[in-house]
Each structure stands twice: as structure tokens, then as C-alpha cells.
Image: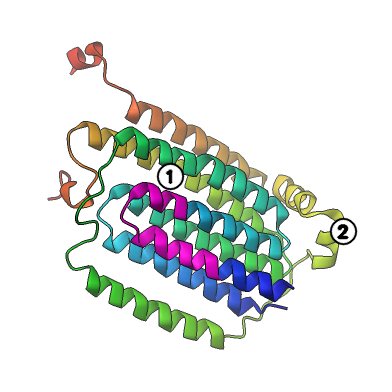
Amino acid sequence: MVPAFFVYFSVVSILAGILTVALRNPVHCGLALLALLMHVAGLFVLLNAEFLFAVQVIVYAGAILVLYLFVLMLLNLKSDERHLHTRYAVMLFAGVAICGELVLLILRSPFHGAKGDAPASAVLKEGDSYAVGIKMFSEYLLPFEIVGVFLLGAIIGAIVLAKTPTAADMEQE
Amino acid sequence: MVPLSAYVAVSAILFVTGLIGVLIRRNFIIVLMAVEIMLNAANLNLVAFSHYLESMTGQIIALFVIAIAAGEAAVGLAIIIVVFRGKISTNVDEMNLLKW
């Protein structure tokens, strides 16, 4: 059952990724990106990461994508006649070649490593959110707080940048 | 049981898709979307390794990546709005004011 779901989620996410890059209308690209995010979230469930699944759906599909769509609607972009660069064929070829090499290398690699302290049975028993929470608020507390400060900086930066300049601002300049 | 290399391969394909998107698209908003695809591919990699190597660290780093993607999207879209207000289009080729 899991391999079938894996094939479905991965094939649809790759197709949605290609559509995101290739479609002409920006709003259609946004909707293809939504499909990609949802199917990557499905892959997270297959990997026993339910908490990240929820975060992916709420933050990525719920917040970030809506932000993108808002800006697209706000700017009211027309679909360009030329939506690709003039010499896109060269980059496309290089990209496909790199992709093929990467996949060949990865499929031949064994990927062994030292096991950590969270075996799948324990995570399934106590729940993924519990395991992530315990780890995050003990070992990774400082990075967590730094992310909070980073987000505050991003909010203030976005507001300052996108604010409509008033007459008083113009006089100062 | 799906092998780890299958997840890593899917992640690599998604990453290269995003990379090609950054290289070939002319619309700045689509370029940002392609960056989101690349960040998602990195997340998938982190979670897959976290599952197969039985460690929670990968999932926590993936959470941080999601937070940073949110900040990047907010600031990037604010920059797009500013550039668009200054009558320049969202075409990446025409944003060359900082170019020497």
C-alpha cells in the first residue's frame, strides 16, 4: 500500500512542479504550486511526520500561497507573450542533464549512517508532534527563538518596503 | 518498504525543476515560486533522512526551513510590489538598476 501511495504522491508532485515552471498564466502556476505542496505533504505522512504535514498544509498552502495569489491579483499581471528567456533551451538542457546525473548517482548510493535516538516504533507510540516538541524545546530552543526574531524582522521589513509613501515622506526626501 | 534513495531521487528531481524555473522564467513572482519548489525539495530530503536514520533533528530543521521560506516570501513579494510601483515590470531582465 505504501509503495503505491509513494508512486502517486511523487509522480503528481513532480508533474505539478514541471507545470509550475512551465505554465504561462501566473495564477495557474500558483495553483500548480498548491498541488505540489499538497502532494509533498502526503509524502511527509508516508514518512511518519504528521506534524510537518500539518505545518506544510497550514503554513505553505494556507499562508504563503495565499500571499502569492494576493500579490498576483493585486498587480493584475498580464500574461506575457514571452514568458521564457530567449536562450532557455541551453539552460533546460543543462538542467535535464544535471537531473539525470543526480538521479543516477542517488539510485546507486547505499546511504548508510549511524542511527539516531528516535526509532520509528517509539515515534509511532508517543506521536510525532510530541517527539518534535520535546526535541525542539530542549535541544533546539535557541535556534527556535532566533527563528522568532527572524520572522519579526521579516514582518517589519515587508511592511516598511510595501508601505505606500505619504506626502510627509516625500517632503523629507 | 520504499528505499531511502527513492525519496532522495524525487527530491533531486524537484530541486532541479525549481532550479530550471529560476533560470528560464522571466516573471519575478514565478522565480520566487520556483525557489519555494527548491526549498520543498530540501524539506523532503531532510524528512526522509530523519525517518530512515531515526533521528528527529531533520524534521526540526525542516520546520526552520518552512519558517525561513515564509519570511523570504513576505520580503520578496514586498520587493516586487515596490518595483512594480516604480513603473518597472515584474520582468527580471528589466530589474538592472543595481547592475554595475
The kind of secondary structure the magenta stretch mainly shows is helix
In the rendered image, residue B88, in percent from the top left (x then y), is placed at 18, 39
Colour convention of the picture: rainbow
Disc 1: which residue: B72
Residue drawn at x 26%, y 20% is: A165
> In this image, A29 relative to B99: left or right?
right
- Circle 2: residue type: Lys
In the rendered image, residue A115, in percent from the top left (x then y), is placed at 74, 73
Q: CA distance from mark 1 to mark 2?
A: 36 Å
Q: Quadrant of the N terminus of chain B?
A: bottom right
Do the dots labelled 1 and 2 sit on one chain? no
| Location of residue A3 with respect to A135 vertically, above or below | below
**Segment tinted magenta in the rendering:** A11-32
In the rendered image, residue A7, in percent from the top left (x then y), is placed at 61, 73
Residue A135 or B93: which is nearer the viewer?
B93
- Circle 1: residue type: Glu
- Looking at the rendered structure, the secondary structure element under dot 1 is helix
Badge 1 crowding class, 10 Å Cα cut-off, few under 14, some 14 to 19, many 20 or more, is some
Residue A11 or A103: which is nearer the viewer?
A11
> In this image, A169 relative to B70: left or right?
left
**Dots 1 and 2: beta carbons under 8 Å?**
no
Residue situated furthest right in the rendering: A125
* Tag shown at residue A125: 2
